[in-house]
Amino acid sequence: MKKNLLIFSLSIFACVTSFAQDSTEVSKVDEYNKWSIELNLGQGKGIKPYSTGYFASNADKVLGSFTLNHFNIGVRYMFSPKFGLKFDGAYDNLKNLSDESLDFEMRQIRIGVQGVVNAARLFDIQESLGRFGMLLHGGIQVAQMTPQMGVNEGVSEWNGGIMVGFTPEFRITKNLAVTADFTLISNVRQHFNWDGAYSDDSNNLAGSMYTTSLGISYSFGSHKVHGDWATITNKQQEEIDALEKRVGQIENDMSDSDQDGVPDYLDVEPNSIAGVAVDTKGRMVDINQNGVPDELEKYLNNTYVTNQTYNNDANSTEMMKKFINDGYVATYFDFNKKQPTNVSTEGIDFIRTYLLNNPEASVDIIGFADEIGNTPYNNKLANDRASNVKEILIKAGIAPERLNVISQGEDTSVDKDSAGARKLVRRVTFKVK
């Protein structure tokens, strides 16, 4: 028997080796194989009852002797990825496993029907288990017991009871798994002791036994993967996920990055200066088209200029310089783009107006990028943005020597996980010298 166990173990190892190259991960599927066939070999052992002088293993030994005496074959059908039904049959040939027990031999042929639960799916841990799985099973069984020696040799009795067990699995391919199984059987009708003696007690015996085995499970059908391992597409969950995504998008659209009262999805200028009046599309109001929002221009004139225009006043010019250098004048870019957005060229026009009104001034054109992507790429992207703004100003009549390009690379001052915040740092700013 030990030789048989070795041969069976080597067979399982050969299966594992031959299919080891199929390491393809199981992807989402709508359909899966529901039928599988299972084969197990191992040891069966009667727990009780025994006559005096008989026992299955020596109580002084932890494990006793091992005998390959249990054979099982079953067919399973899964109604859903979590629940199924299994029909199986088994052959057990129970003998004494200890030199100190009197000789006995009991043959048992059993059939059973059991419910099956995929515990990994039931507790929603299949993703964390990976290639491992766990099945729980339990049901009813009937068996024919026939002593093979002694006074009752050849006399058969039918008995029955309940059985429960668990089966760890390890996936080799999408349809093949190596299994181990432990099953406990408790008979509610049994008159034979496991040693073959007929009980003198007229009542039924509370007979019990257990089996431990190794085996393989193979699913079959028209699909590429068994339900034990498939990541099942859940239509209802997909609809919920899509709805959550839409709600998240709406929340993002309704955000107001520049706090001007116009939500971002309607705001064509999402970088307006706080406190400056905007129109219904979020654009700062500049009726005279001089590159300075009217409300800001009015404030500057009232604060720094008395009865003079800011263009002709030294204090106003200095204030404009501070206004630029503090970053209030900027132009913005879409994700991974080098050209300014159509709605953010006012900043470039403002700088052009300033340079035309101040012919001795020159400016640094400073490019920025957000943190998405690798740093070397973002440094180049920031430089390209500044260079493109320079080209626009050159074509608008500003001498190249008055324009100096600087790349500041990634701006890490905002939360990089916020799409709205990242919009604010994909920009070019200016510094008057």
Image (cartoon, rainbow, N blue to C red):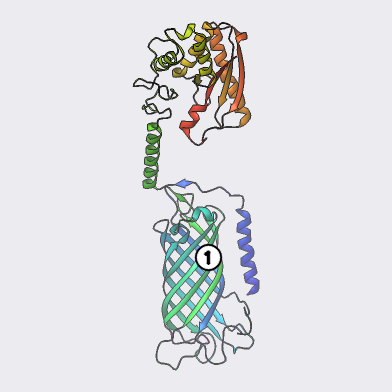
Examine the residues drawn in magenta and state their main secondary structure. loop
Whether residue 195 is in magenta: the answer is: yes
In this view, the residue farthest toward the left is 280
Residue 97 showing in the rendered view: yes
Which residue is nearer to you in this view: 396 or 432? 432
Residue 398 in picture, x, y percent from top left: 56, 7
151 with respect to 13 (left or right): left
Quadrant assignment for the C terminus: top right
Q: Residue furthest bottom?
A: 200
| Front-most of residues 292 and 5 | 292
| Residue 74: x %, y % from top left | 47, 66
Write the residue at 52% across / 65% down.
39
* Residue 345 seen from this side: no
Residue linked to disc 1: 39
Q: Is residue 351 magenta?
A: no
Residue 227 horizontal/vertical position (percent)? 45, 54
**Quadrant of residue 1 within the rendered picture:** bottom right
Segment colored magenta? 190-196
**Label 1: element kind:** strand
Instruction: Tell me how many marks there are.
Output: 1
Q: Quadrant of residue 303?
A: top left
Vertical relation: 280 (above or below) 415: above
Point 62% across, 54% down: residue? 18
Which of the 4 image quarters holds residue 56? bottom right
The amino acid beneath tag 1 is Leu
Name the residue rendered at 56%, 12% in the picture. Answer: 391
Residue 29 position (above or below residue 192): above
Taking depth in this image into account, of 171 and 73 the one nearest to the observer is: 171
